[in-house]
Amino acid sequence: MRTIKSLLVALPMLAVLMLPSTKVHAATESACTVATIQYDNSVRLAVWCSGVGPIHYAFGAGYGAACRSASVDTIKVWESMLQSALLAGKKVDLDYTTDPDCFSGTVRIITQLRLQAN
């Protein structure tokens, strides 16, 4: 009897753990040629890469817990780096995540960026 009760408790937990996760997806947009940069006072940075469809965003506080936020200082540094890449013709690598709870998962949220050396 004790074994059956244990199984009845353990099986639902095991089933939940085996469900595929659709929460957050991380990826990198490599060798982005910056086409356009937009920064606005809602503390949002938008980046368009040449030849790439989706826009990449960095959000400040106020867009909800699901939309991973960056500090205002970080966003300003990223904006300066992206502007430098645009003017110098350098490429950048953009690490980003998507979260289904942030604008229905359609937004690429920048987590890090790197200027390429070439």
Image: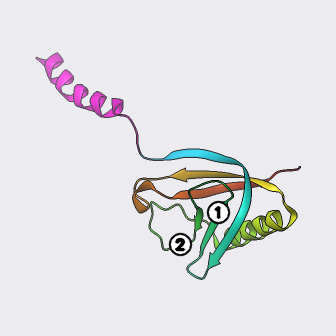
Residue 36 percent across, percent down from the top left: 69, 68
**Residue 11 magenta:** yes
Q: Look at discs 1 and 2 and give the one toward the viewer.
A: 1
Q: Tag 2, which secondary structure?
A: loop
Q: Quadrant of the N terminus?
A: top left
Query: Left or right: where does residue 33 sit relative to residue 9?
Result: right
Instruction: Give the residues drawn in magenta, as a range.
Output: 1-22
Instruction: Find disc 2 in the rendering and name its residue.
Output: 61
Instruction: Find disc 1 in the rendering and name its residue.
Output: 48
**Residue 34 magenta:** no
**Residue 13: which quarter of the image?**
top left
What residue lies at 23% left-to-right and 31% top-to-bottom? 12
Residue 103 percent across, percent down from the top left: 42, 62
Q: Tag 1, which secondary structure?
A: strand
Say if mark 1 contacts mark 2, CB within 8 Å. Answer: no
Alpha-carbon span between mark 1 and mark 2: 22 Å
Which circle's residue, 1 or 2, is located before the other in the chain? Answer: 1
